[in-house]
């Protein structure tokens, strides 16, 4: 299959704050598949780099690589809206 123009991933900074950040800090790990929802903002640095930020309102843990092949740890598909 040929690669299409624009298929490159768009990386962004997901920003969580307050109690939401406290709850999620122990639940989120590198490599997890998550669904996030929130408000996008863009910031241009002095060197011309554009940073894309997402102020997260909702986060759903879809898959945890540590439990791959396991029946699930109870957090999958759980929504934490704060």
Image (cartoon, rainbow, N blue to C red):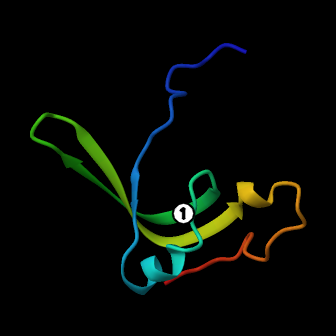
Place of residue 40 in the rendered image (x, y in percent of width and height, measured from the top left): 36, 58
At horizontal 52% and vertical 82% (from top left) the residue drawn is 23
Place of residue 17 in the rendered image (x, y in percent of width and height, measured from the top left): 36, 76
Residue 17, placed above or below residue 4: below
Taking the image as shown, residue 36 lies to the left or right of residue 71, namely left
**Crowding at label 1, few (<14), some or many (≥20) Cα neighbours within 10 Å?**
some
State which quarter of the image contains the N terminus. top right
Which image quarter: residue 2?
A: top right
Taking the image as shown, residue 57 lies to the left or right of residue 50, namely right
Q: Which residue is mark 1?
A: 36
Taking the image as shown, residue 72 lies to the left or right of residue 16, namely right
At horizontal 88% and vertical 55% (from top left) the residue drawn is 69
Place of residue 56 in the rendered image (x, y in percent of width and height, measured from the top left): 44, 68
The one nearer the camera, 82 or 20, is: 20
SS label for mark 1: strand
Which image quarter: residue 61?
A: bottom right
The mark total stands at 1
At horizontal 33% and vertical 49% (from top left) the residue drawn is 52
Place of residue 72 in the rendered image (x, y in percent of width and height, measured from the top left): 84, 68
The one nearer the camera, 17 or 42, is: 17
Which image quarter: residue 39?
A: bottom left
Residue 11, placed above or below residue 8: below
Residue farthest toward the left in the current orientation of the protein? 46
């Amino acid at each position: 299959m040929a690669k299409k123009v624009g298929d490159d991933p768009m990386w962004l900074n997901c920003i969580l704050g307050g109690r939401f950040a406290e709850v999620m800090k122990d639940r989120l790990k590198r490599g997890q598949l998550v669904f996030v929802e929130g408000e996008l903002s863009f910031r241009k640095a002095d060197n011309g780099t554009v940073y894309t930020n997402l102020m997260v309102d909702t986060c759903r843990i879809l898959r945890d690589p540590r439990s791959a092949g396991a029946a699930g740890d109870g957090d999958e598909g759980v929504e934490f809206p704060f």
